[in-house]
């Protein structure tokens, strides 16, 4: 297909992809932002540690199935089903938490089960949107990735409005805050769903999605058996329409493993080890929301910065492995705060620096991996390349959540026993 006939990328299209990025992570970001609410009603679950672990159990399984068997779910089903499912679960989860009794066993089981099931929905959302955007130019990949960062910022700003409107911290206030917060989250997802439905009929979308399909057909036709100089269109060699998990991994293994490591480091330290540190003497609700906001802002900046540099494997490796030092510095800052009792202003500033670096390098590394992956494969496999990186990203989150139990045990040793 002649690339000169490609529709122009406009600012409005970039905004749409940014909104898709918002939708792809809004479900998880909404739960993350409201961890204080869940911690109030379900303290025995330790939501700051357990929620990310529970949420990514099924997520990993279905991300792998979507990647391994490309036609298991259509792209439309992944995108529409994932968005609609996010809306449903953002209603069910807080509702069950409120209705089933504070810290009751039945509440823990059902809410925990819903968090696990939502992992399937998140797999559809993240895998679908990354599979979609991998068919488009790099600028749209950056736009969607930047939108993912904005997803968290939007949730934090909504939470600030709610916290400032309802300042008390009793159960009734937590319920009102959660209702307002989750209703707004659902409205945002509904807007994104409408934009998604309209986009499928947009010329720009149809061009790039059909481009990948046509190139796949052209490759398939080139591989058809020839008999007496005639092309046998009655038989198709379907085995050549998509590459296997192992074959694709051989092509982009370095990017898959880099994004895996990025998220192991990130989720080993965030949110639990970061949120549990004090910030300038703020109350826990404001402190935790501020730390998450700092993370989301710097993560968004990092994703956007990729559009200002030339993406390269060497830059990706420097960013990815350089952030390993944060595994020490962020935990050590907790020790300085609780164990050595440094000045709260000093440790708060160091906390902001550490969280900012953790987030910025996360954003840069993630966008570089997704931006470089489609260039490592043939055009007809670009969507699969995005899904592959998305799977290893989810695997990294799950493994990082497992490591978070270790970091949580370490920082617990720094806490002085209460008298």
Image (cartoon, rainbow, N blue to C red):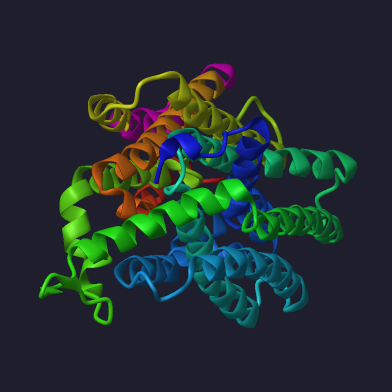
Residue extending furthest toward the right = 165
Question: Residue drawn 71% across and 37% down?
Answer: 286
Residue 254's place in the image compared with 392, above or below, is above
In the displayed structure, does residue 76 sit left or right of residue 34? left
Span highlighted in magenta in the image: 324-346
Q: Residue 235 magenta-drawn?
A: no
Evaluate whether residue 226 shows in this view: yes
In the displayed structure, does residue 297 sit left or right of residue 123? right
Residue 312 placement: quadrant: top left
Question: Residue drawn 37% across and 51% down?
Answer: 386
Residue placed most toward the observer, 181 or 203: 203
Residue 384's place in the image compared with 241, above or below, is above
Residue placed most toward the observer, 192 or 258: 192
In the rendering, at what x and y percent does residue 297 appear?
A: 59, 30
Give the prevailing secondary structure in the magenta stretch.
helix
Residue 235 placement: quadrant: bottom left
Question: Residue drawn 44% across and 62% down?
Answer: 53
Evaluate whether residue 339 shows in this view: no
State the count of labels.
0
In the rendering, at what x and y percent does residue 354 appear?
A: 45, 26
In the displayed structure, does residue 398 sit left or right of residue 207? left
Q: Residue 328 magenta-drawn?
A: yes
Which part of the image, by quadrant, shows the C terminus? top right
Residue extending furthest toward the left = 228
Residue placed most toward the observer, 60 or 376: 376
Residue 371's place in the image compared with 341, above or below, is below
In the rendering, at what x and y percent does residue 10 appear?
A: 62, 32
In the rendering, at what x and y percent does residue 228 appear?
A: 10, 75
């Amino acid at each position: 297909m002649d690339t000169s006939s490609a529709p122009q990328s406009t600012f409005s299209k970039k905004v749409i992809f940014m909104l898709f990025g918002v939708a792809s992570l809004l479900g998880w970001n909404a739960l993350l932002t409201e961890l204080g609410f869940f911690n109030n009603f379900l303290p025995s679950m330790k939501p700051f540690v357990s929620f990310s672990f529970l949420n990514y159990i099924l997520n990993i399984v279905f991300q792998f199935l979507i990647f391994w068997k490309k036609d298991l779910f259509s792209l439309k089903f992944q995108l529409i089903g994932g968005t609609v499912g996010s809306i449903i679960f953002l209603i069910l989860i807080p509702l069950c938490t409120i209705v089933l009794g504070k810290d009751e066993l039945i509440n823990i089981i059902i809410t925990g089960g819903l968090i696990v099931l939502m992992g399937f929905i998140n797999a559809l959302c993240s895998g679908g949107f990354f599979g979609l955007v991998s068919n488009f130019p790099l600028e749209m990949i950056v736009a969607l990735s930047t939108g993912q960062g904005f997803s968290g910022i939007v949730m934090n700003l909504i939470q600030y409005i709610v916290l400032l409107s309802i300042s008390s911290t009793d159960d009734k206030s937590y319920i009102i805050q959660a209702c307002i917060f989750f209703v707004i989250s659902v409205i945002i997802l509904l807007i994104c769903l409408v934009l998604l439905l309209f986009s499928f009929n947009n010329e720009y979308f149809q061009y790039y999605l059909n481009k990948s399909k046509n190139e796949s057909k052209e490759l398939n036709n080139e591989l058809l058996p020839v008999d007496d100089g005639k092309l046998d269109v009655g038989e198709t060699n379907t085995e050549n329409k998509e590459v296997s998990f192992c074959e694709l991994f051989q092509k982009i293994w370095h990017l898959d493993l880099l994004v895996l490591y990025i998220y192991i480091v990130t989720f080993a330290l965030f949110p639990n080890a970061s949120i549990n540190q004090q910030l300038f003497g703020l109350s826990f609700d404001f402190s935790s929301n501020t730390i998450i906001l700092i993370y989301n802002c710097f993560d968004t900046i990092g994703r956007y910065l990729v559009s200002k540099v030339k993406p390269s494997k060497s830059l990706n490796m420097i960013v990815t492995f350089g952030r390993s030092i944060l595994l020490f510095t962020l935990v050590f800052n907790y020790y300085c705060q609780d164990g050595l009792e440094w000045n709260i202003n000093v440790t708060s500033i160091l906390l902001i620096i550490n969280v900012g670096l953790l987030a910025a390098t996360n954003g840069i590394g993630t966008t570089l991996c997704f931006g470089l992956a489609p260039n490592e494969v043939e055009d007809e496999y670009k969507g699969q390349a995005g899904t592959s990186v998305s799977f290893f990203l989810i695997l990294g989150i799950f493994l990082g959540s497992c490591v978070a139990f270790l970091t949580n045990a370490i920082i617990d040793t720094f806490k002085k026993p209460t008298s």
